[in-house]
Image (cartoon, rainbow, N blue to C red):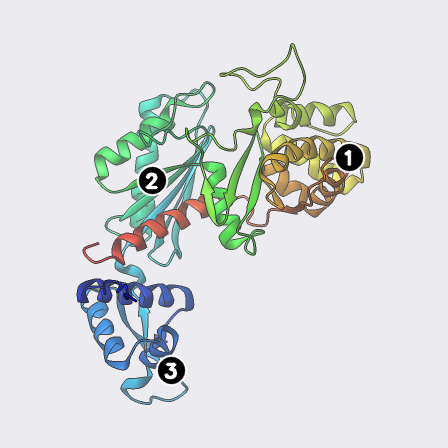
Amino acid sequence: MSVIRMPSASPSTARAINDRLALDLLQREGPLTAAQLKTSTGLSRPTVADLVDRLRDAGLIAIVGEAGAERRGPNAKLYGIVAERAYLAGLDIRTHGMAVSVADLLGRTRAEASLPFDLDVDTDLAVERAIALLETTTAEAGATELHTIAVGAPGLVDPATGGLRPAGGLPAWHGKLVVELRRRLGIPVLLENEVNLAAAAEQRLGAARDRDTFVLLWLGYGVGAAVVLDGSLRRGASGGAGEIGFLPMLGPGRLPTATDCDGGFHTLAGSAALCELARAHGIPASPADDAEAAAAAVGYAIDAGAGEFLDIVAERIAIGSAAVTAVLDPGCVVLGGEVGRAGRDALADRVSRRLAEISPLRTEVRAGTVGGSAVLEGAVLTAMGAAQDALFTPGG
């Protein structure tokens, strides 16, 4: 009987694996002593001592205190990741403006700012103002440079180019800003659909922390979805997974087209449709018909006990949810965006009951909990993950 021997890792590979193991542990658990690292990693005392020396020499970890109420010598030294080793930024760009957050390597916010834009703003002017805001916020955070930037934007991200696909109704400065950031800064600038970033925030910080498979249903000016299966975000072959605004809903003669989602789920649950529905039920709704107006109408209806209006809204959302769950069976749908946030548990419970009546698949419906900063939080988390992957890897 022959014995198949697996090749052993080279010393350098083994060191890299051990270093990353220790760094991931420190990132997750916070400062630890060498003894605690030994216990948690299962590595030998000499191996832990060597990796601590390597990581300190690389400027990735430092002594941040001592364990216990009293000083107890070298073995009580607490080692933690040097948060100032790198700074990163998250950007949330919308049709009406942008928000930026600069954080350290542990994702802790150091400075934030926002800037409104008119819809008809000049493209070049918008780009220059956006970059200036990023530079000012970076300086306020105490950073001289950024390691990684993650940008959340509405629209489709082309997986081949890493840029935004041209789309009607979206400002031209969105795509040009990403191009200019990459050209001028020479650092990684990651671009992601805004709903996908909101899902990352809900999974890490919010309503989906206990789920590795779920769908985030975004209810704002338009509608969209982010699909997370087995812990991984699914973008689709062309980056369009979750574009549920185009789901045909209204039958022949009024179907969406490749360039216009009128006649799709957007026509049922987008902000304009909800504002129109609110006015028909005597509920105040701004003529702007934007996401804030729809959210305000839903919030007003909850406070006023306008059950009939809320039931219709819930049914419309349940129809889109049923279409998604019939294909993916995620077991959990999280309601995000301005409308989902305004609806809170009152809307989620109504959607859950209606969905149970029209779908045979057991699906929990939850209200998103991250709040209005979900896209920005997701952008920071994405930038932090990329920066850590680069720095925690030998040669990064």
Task: Give residue 102's position: percent from left, percent from top.
Answer: 36, 49
Q: Indicate the quadrant where residue 320 lies.
A: top right
Residue that badge 3 annotates: 67
Give the left or right position of residue 373, taking residue 143 as reference: right
Residue 167 vertical position relative to residue 224 in the rendered view, above or below: above
Point out the residue furthest to the top here: 253
Distance from the alpha carbon under mark 2 to that under mark 3: 39 Å
Tell me which label, 3 or 1, sits earlier in the chain. 3
| Secondary structure of the residue carrying numbered label 1 | helix
Distance from the alpha carbon under mark 3 to that under mark 1: 56 Å
Task: Give residue 314's position: percent from left, percent from top.
Answer: 72, 35
Q: Circles 2 and 3: CB distance less than 8 Å?
A: no
> Amino acid under label 2?
Leu
Q: Nearer the viewer, residue 236 or 311?
A: 236
Tell me which label, 2 or 3, sits earlier in the chain. 3
Residue 18 vertical position relative to residue 35 in the rendered view, above or below: above
Of marks 2 and 3, the one in the foreground: 2
Q: Quadrant of the N terminus?
A: bottom left
> Amino acid under label 1?
Asp
Q: Indicate the quadrant where residue 124 lies.
A: top left
Give the left or right position of residue 286, taking residue 203 as reference: right
